[in-house]
Each structure stands twice: as structure tokens, then as C-alpha cells.
Image (spheres, grey):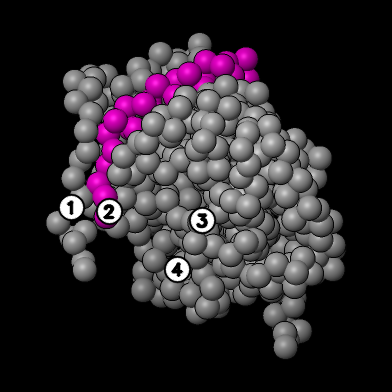
Amino acid sequence: MFTSNQVLETIEMIEKEHLDIRTVTMGISLLPCIRETAEKTAAEVYSRVMKRAEKLVPTAEELSREFGIPIVNKRVSVTPVSLVTAAFPDESGKVGQALDRAARELGIDFLGGYSALVHKGTADYEEKFLATIPEVLASTQRLCASVNVGSSRSGINMDAVGKMGEIVKETAALTAKDGGIGCCKLVVFCNAVEDNPFMAGAFHGVGERDAVINVGVSGPGVVQHALKFVPDADLTDAAEVIKRTAFKITRAGQLIAKEAAKRLNVPFGIVDLSLAPTPARGDSVAHILEELGLSVVGCHGTTAALAMLNDAVKKGGVMASSRVGGLSGAFIPVSEDSGMIESAERGGITIEKLEAMTCVCSVGLDMIALPGDTPATTISAIIADEAAIGMVNNKTTAVRVIPVPGKNVGDEVNFGGLLGRAPVMPVHGGDASRFIGRGGLIPAPIHSFKN
């Protein structure tokens, strides 16, 4: 039972501190949809998503009204499409179009899973699938793509890393009139997780049930507000405040997740308790770090503060739910965080500092605008660096960068909505083309042998 004080506290968090359920995501297996042709498979995929997710949006809206908690996004993730279209990879776009049409007709915000898992090597059918990504992302609105190029167990597939730099550039070029927005729907992973409810990297794992409900909770503003009451606390006490706040946020997510699963007659999967910011004032991970005592995010001390924040969030969340999963931590997307945007505009944070921060936070280099003339090999090198951090540290890392066509350092690109706006950030001018051109596999670290 909730006490009257807890109810009032939750209302305060919702109304003044930007507490929300960032997403209710239904994962759906597409494996039963595989047929002998692309056309028949696409038709089955469309039918299955329409049937399974038919009540997702109205149910989420109903829960939001009943519990008074905003549910910002209603999403679907599916089996990596490269597995579904392995027999006809050149025609994978037909399945992508079917998925986008289903998302549009159901009112789903984003649908993730136009994905491939190539962390140890790229099969012939996956090579052909990867080649379809730019055109598919350019011709759809709600479909998201992801590619896993490395893992702590297998190493890093540098042939795929080299290819992904080219794919990012081509995707940007095909969506140039919208600032390269296609790249906002494409993420490159190391150690991708199968129960991530957040886009653009969500997909439904092959080891999952037929369908499942995963919920992503977010409350950077709630954490920042809580820290305002302990301005002189040492970092031990500050971590305790963050843990208690994360506990409360996660309990709200658990409540919505279990009720959504019950009403949709789909098993409850996990709660992802990531602190996912938005461009709105008062909903920033960067401002949490500044509340801890940094003059500006990106200065010396930022990585240590982020490490403490990420750990405290995880510790508080796992006490609130036995089904915590996904990415669960603190996100640092530049364009989607008002504090990050402000720091980047002033030159207070660089890509190199963001890379250092990814060693201790959830995910990686996220929603960063690059000059449009950034070479594909430089983008591949950025991906390789992040994959190495993930591989060695046994954590998920990712890259979602946008080489904005026609834009240079100091210019700005505005994607709108939750995708926000971003200043174009400088990239190191050194040339990594010989390194990327070597290809092959970077072997897994010695600690990968755990059997």
C-alpha cells in the first residue's frame, strides 16, 4: 500500500520534476513469420505486429490517465530482421517497409529491430542486409536500425566496423534535407543487450519469449531536485540520496510495467531504470552532475561524478525490482540533454571527454553531430574506440553520430521533439584510414575465457 505522503511525493515528481515512463515497449518475435519469399514474409510480419500490438497504444494511454503518470512513448521491438530475411537479404527492405507501415497505423512512436548481429563475423546474407540499411532508413519514418559489431566474448569485427562508417555516411547523405536524420535511427553496438526498451537500439532477442513487455523509466529531474536538498553533503551521502530516489522512480516503473503486461496479456519482461534526458529544462543528466559540484559538465571531475551517479542509480533500482534489465544507468546523448547542449555550445565538452565518460556510464557516444565532411574511416575509428571500451570493460557501448551534410563546426542542427538539437562538434583531424583498412578481427581480451 502507498501512504498519503508517498502519493503526494509522486505527484510532486510528476508535476514539477519531469518524472515519466519514457517508454512501454512490446517485444515481438518474428521468427514464425518466415516464408519462402520476401513478399509473403513481409505480409506475415505486418499481420503479426498489427495483431500483437493492436492494444499497446490505447492501453498505455489508459494507464497514463488512471495512474496520472505520463507515458511518453509507445514502442515495439522485433527479432533482428537480418535473421528473418536471411534467405532473401537483398529484399529485406520489404520487411522494413511492412514494419514501418504497421507502426504508423498503430500509432507507435518507434519500432526497433532492423538489426544485424555481426560481432564475430559477417555472413554473406548479413553483408547484403547491411547494404539495405541507408535506403530503408531514408524511406521510413519510425523504423530504427542497429548493428552489433563486437562483444567481450568474441572481440571486434573490424570488417563490419569499416562498413558501418560507410553506412552512416550514406544514411546521412540520403536524408540530407532533414539534417541527416536517418542517422538518428541507427546505432552501432558492442555487447548489445536483448531486452533494451530504448531506441534506436532495441530489438527482441531470440532467447526471449514470443512477446514481452519492457518498460523504460526516466527521472533526471527528480534526481537533480533531490540533490538540491543536500547541497553540502559529502559524496557518500549524496550517493545515498540518489539510491533512494532511483528506488522510488523504479517502483513507479514496476507498477506500470506489471499492469501493462496484465492488461495486454503479455509476460512482463524488465524495467530499465536508465536516466534518459530530454531537451526540456529540468530534465538533464548534465545538470545532475553540475548539482554535485561541477561548474560545467565536461570539466575535470565529470567522469568521476558520472561513475558515482551511474552506480547509485543501479543500486537503488535493483532494490525496487527483481526484473531490472536493459541498459539501466545514466545516458549522455548530446542533442537530447539541455545541459549537454549548453556545454557543447560553449566548448565545455568534447568528443574525447564524452568518450572517457562512456567508460563509466550506460551506452556510449550518443546523438553527436559531426561535420558533414567527416570521412567514413574517421566514423569507423570512433566506432572502434567505443567498441574497445565495451569489449575490455564487459559493458554495453554504442555510437550514434550524425555527420550533418553541409554543416561545419559551430553550426547547429535541429531534429525536433525528443531528438533535440545539437551544435556540430569538432573531430580530431588525424587519419585512421590505414588502421581501419586492415580489417580482420580484434581478438577478445584474455578475461573473456571464463569457462
| Residue 34 as seen in the image, left or right of residue 263 | left
Residue 365: which quarter of the image?
A: top left
Amino acid at pointer 1: Pro
User: Label 3 near label 4: C-beta < 8 Å?
Assistant: no
Q: In the rendered image, which quarter contains the C terminus?
A: bottom left
Of tags 1 and 4, which is closer to the observer?
Answer: 1
> Residue at the spot x=75%, y=69% of the render?
265
Q: Circle 2 — which element?
A: loop
Residue 197: which quarter of the image?
A: bottom right
Where is residue 428? Give x, y as percent: 28, 24
Q: Which residue lies under the disc numbered 1?
A: 445
The earlier-in-sequence mark between 1 and 4 is 4
User: Which numbered dot is residue 328?
Assistant: none
User: Label 2 near label 3: C-beta < 8 Å?
Assistant: no
> Residue at the spot x=50%, y=43% of the render?
83
Q: How far apart are marks 3 and 2 (CA)?
A: 18 Å
Q: How far apart are marks 3 and 1 (CA)?
A: 25 Å
Region rendered in magenta: 153-179
Q: Which residue lies under the disc numbered 4?
A: 314
Q: Circle 3 — which element?
A: loop
> Residue at the spot x=45%, y=68% of the render?
314
Membership of 174 in magenta stretch: yes
Where is residue 184? Give x, y as percent: 55, 33
Q: Distance between the residues labelled 2 and 4?
A: 21 Å
Q: Which residue lies under the disc numbered 2?
A: 152
| Residue 344 as seen in the image, left or right of residue 105 | left
Membership of 219 in magenta stretch: no
Where is residue 418? Give x, y as percent: 64, 41
